[in-house]
Amino acid sequence: MESQPYHNSIKYLQVILISFAILGFQMVSILPEVVGVESRIVTVPYRAFYLVIVMLVIFLFRWQFKINKYFVPILAFIFFYFIRSVYDSITKYDELKHILVDFWLFAYLIGFFPMIPLLFKVNTNTLNTAKAVLFVMVIIVNILGFKNNYGSFGEENIGARFFGNEILNQITYGQTGVIMVIMCLSYFYSQKLIGKLVLLPFIGLGLMNLAFAGSRGPMIELSLAIICFIVVNFKKIGAINLTIAIIFFISLGIYFRDYLIFFNTILDRLQDTRFNQGNGSEERYFLFKNSWEQFWANPVFGYVGIGEYPHNLILEAFMALGFAGGILMIYIVIIAFRNCIALVKIETTNWIALIFLMHIIAAFISGSIWNSFEFWSLLALSFSLYQHRNLYLT
């Protein structure tokens, strides 16, 4: 069996890197309101701090770096995307100059560059510590998000969608609730009865923030993550334990049925997920349709890579990079699912697999290539964990 790197001692720089790659921005987003300053005064130094951590990990642990052959097509995709970015920046400068600085900073320094240290080998103690740190972070973010919105909820606001704070939009806010539930689920299985009871209020907290956000995307992401966890680990969980859990949560829902009104917004939006004229999905349908038409306008080299995106990474890859880029993105998604399915079977890594699965699903319904920071970071981390998965078997 493969030996643990660094003698299995905790490497705190990697702990910070992993936890901040997943939830750092959401954690920092609470500071402007607490300190009473404009958001950029906090977010800009945070991004600089994050880049320093990235560079320190690269410098200190670079000897553990090894490119897996399955990662080469991903590097090819990033290279093609870089060429497209340069081409668009030159040929469409006047049209794009207002977003070029942000695009290059976010796409490459915050998006692709942190993938390098996240490919490095991580020992079990470091990974478990990162999990504990992330759990504390997500509790803080969820408590403050709940505090911001609970007082605003009333009969007159039923059907409203709430932000996490001045920085977190509804989707990102809802995803903090999803991460809360996922982290509890990861700990839940190994806990004794007292530990399970302690985790239940945190599960409720995550679900309440998911309800306040009122976004169907995070709800779909959570549902599929739970289904994946149950299906993959069905033998470990057992039919009896699963039945008891289902009965318990149904009973809990019946007992607290008066509070299910909080989920009306999500249910209404799920019912509107169709492409009929006048509903909330119509605009998304036309984004999909237009991006596909733009791909066929230039299927070899693509149409445009900066400034337009259809909220679907595969469609965007076809649109921006042509046929080759689209095929590479399909490969990326397939290999990402492979990593998730393998890692969700392992208790030490299942939390990362489920959070990554959340972002894979989100890649089909929101965001773009250049600002899907967590997707690219978790893609790299999942490769490292998958390649060295024997380290985490217990």
Image: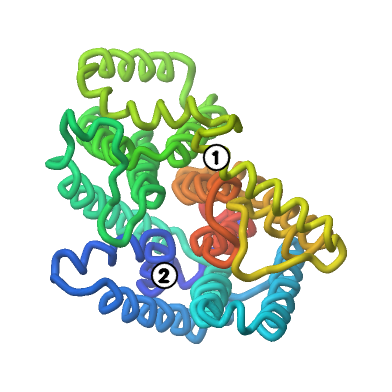
Q: Secondary structure at mark 1?
A: loop
**Residue 272 coordinates in the image, percent (x, y):** 49, 29
The residue tagged 1 is 345
Q: Is residue 393 visible?
A: no
- Residue found 70% across the figure and 51% down from its top: 290
Is the residue 308 above or below the residue 191 in the image? below
Please state, as top left, top right, bottom left or bottom right, where the N terminus lies in the image: bottom right
| Horizontal relation, residue 280 to residue 384: left or right | left
Is the residue 92 above or below the residue 274 in the image? below
Lower position in the chain sequence, tag 2 or tag 1: 2
Near-viewer residue (303 or 391):
303
| Horizontal relation, residue 351 to residue 296: left or right | left
**Residue 135 coordinates in the image, percent (x, y):** 30, 52
- Residue found 26% across the figure and 36% down from its top: 208
| Horizontal relation, residue 93 to residue 259: left or right | right
Is the residue 126 above or below the residue 219 in the image? below
**Residue 353 coordinates in the image, percent (x, y):** 52, 48
Q: Which mark is residue 17?
A: 2
- Amino acid type at image mark 2: Leu
Q: CA separation, marks 2 and 1?
A: 24 Å
